[in-house]
Image: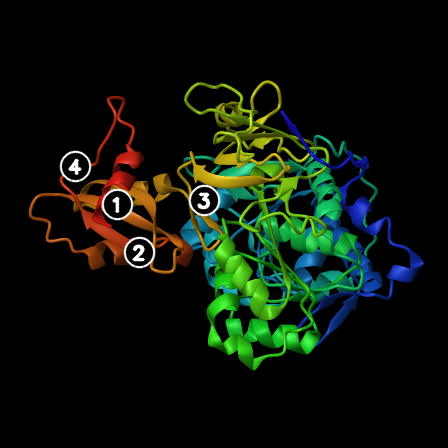
Amino acid sequence: MFLSPYPDVDIPDQSIYDYLFGSLEDADLDRVALIDPDTTAETTYRTLRAQVDAFAGALAARGVEAGTVVAMLCPNVPAFATVFHGILRLGATVTTINSLYTAHEIEAQLRDAGATWLVTVSPLLAPASEAARAAGIDDDHLVVLDGAGHHPDLATLLGEGRTPPSVSFDPATHVAVLPYSSGTTGNPKGVMLSHRNLVANVQQCRVSIRLDRDDRVLAVLPFFHIYGMTVLLNLALRQRASLVTMPRFDLVAFLRNIQTHQCTFLFIAPPIAVALAKHPVVDDFDISSVHSVFSGAAPLDGETAEAAGRRIHAQIFQGYGMSELSPVSHAIPPERGDTPVSSVGMLLPNVEAKLVDPETGDELEAHDDDGLTEPGEIWVRGPNVMLGYLGRPEATAETIDEDGFLHTGDIAVHHVDGYFTIVDRLKELIKYKGYQIAPAELEALLLSHPKIADAAVIGVLDDDHQEIPKAFVVTQPDSGLTEDDVMAFVAGEVAPHKKVRRVEFIDAVPKSTSGKILRKDLRAREQQRK
């Protein structure tokens, strides 16, 4: 068993609203919470709290209550914070939807989550309204924040000035958010995170991720993703920092916003680190205000991290987590300058972990002469572990054991100095630019094509060493199907990050006697090709 090097922190028995906004002091109220770089409009903590309350009151007047599921299909704009926390203020549950999803994908999540309301913005109204109609959501339950058509809008709802009702629920068991994750395998599942999960992970992160009230954070990682939701939005609000919101990533706009708004702390995924390390346009901007960069969502290699840090003269840190962990379990703390940036750092406070041999089930604790354990699957236990998967008790039981340890599906080694390094993956997920892609979802789609007899999907590395989906396809006789045909078919049905980016035609998909795809054989095939 490995323990955090930090003493346990107190986890307040509060809702996330009370934790973030109930603790506001008078000195914080006129601090800037949110900045819209497109309009330069600023929202203070005083105004944000008032907007959260007013939005909650407006929804309550329309029948939203504890247990109601409200979906959000919304990019990073200041209003996201108002809506997200207004929903949670009522004890309702938020399911956040990827802004790149197609109408079909949106509908699937609405139905699975049991959402009866959907909040979006006008640029996403076409797929949102199509999905809402298909899922049985009425027009008056489709809120378009910036106003469009005959739907409720944010200005109108806030203008009613309603006071939210008092609500009471158990923060430890009441579901606050339902992000969707593929877990270690399979199609996306609703991850039930309680108010206590969210509060706990912010409290834990405060120890290892040293964001403070004088920081300005460039919020480009999406709030709909659990990384953005907890580590950007909630942590920044708890620390009374300022968030500069970006609805989409564009490198030039990213750099310009850092320069214009003097951003000091960046939360990124590995592709942004690659750009910071290598892209020539970085030299055209003064981003010397940045002192810290924290990378997560997918593994970042140490060489790229160090190159990025040297180039922009900032400290680079890395962490580890997953939606099922709210999401952070490991992080490199600033005071541990000797910790390799290629590692994911130390366990957060209140977290215990095991490394388990996936073949034998034996726990691994002994360190060799180099100070390393044998590789093992990381099992994690702590107050940030999810309640379970929505409506999927079997998948929950496969992921969280009777002792409360969540089996992550990632293989790591532990160093005697206390840090962990991810070395491999048991789970089948593909991580493309920080987004999870379930091979099973793409395989099911490919099999729906009349000219495809069988298919398998794995992650492979592209020329920039980023993982991308590759499909191995068995065609029907005389199909005439081409690689471009396959890629175009998938691209027409899924969000851009899920697109198949390489195709190889094979005679048969390797499978076990039980019919399970042998992805290790396909990966071995890839290695032989190199």
Q: Is residue 385 above or below residue 150?
A: above
Q: Which circle, 1 or 3, is nearer the viewer?
A: 1
Q: Residues within 10 Å of mark 3 (few under 14, many from 20)?
A: some
Q: Are the residues at dot 2 and dot 4 in contact (C-beta closer than 8 Å)? A: no
Secondary structure under tag 4 reads loop
Residue 71 visible = no
Task: Please state the horizontal and vertical placement of residue 501, each as a whole percent of the image.
Answer: 31, 56
Q: Amino acid at mark 4?
A: Ala
Looking at the image, the residue that sits furthest to the right is 26
Left-right relation of 146 to 274? right
Residue drawn at x 75%, y 47% is 206
Mark 1 or mark 3, earlier in chain:
3
The image quadrant that residue 198 belongs to is: top right
- How far, Cα to Cα, is label 2 from label 4? 20 Å
The residue lying toward the viewer, choosing from 303 and 29, is: 303
**Which residue position is annotated with label 3?**
108
Single out the mark in the foreground, 3 or 4: 4
Q: In the picture provided, is 399 more to the left or to the right than 474?
A: right
Q: Of all residues shown, which one is farthest toward the bottom?
A: 284
In terms of secondary structure, where does tag 1 sit? helix
Q: What amino acid type is highlighted by mark number 1?
A: Glu
Residue 379 screen position, x and y as percent: 56, 29
The amino acid at mark 3 is Ala
Q: Nearer the viewer, mark 2 or mark 1?
A: 1
Location of mark 1 (residue): 526
Q: Residue 202: where, in percent of width, then height?
A: 72, 45
Give neighbour class at mark 1: few <14, some 14-19, many 20+ (Cα, 10 Å): few
Determine contact: label 3, label 4, CB under 8 Å.
no
The reply, left or right, for residue 324 in relation to residue 209 is left
Amino acid at the residue labelled 2:
Arg
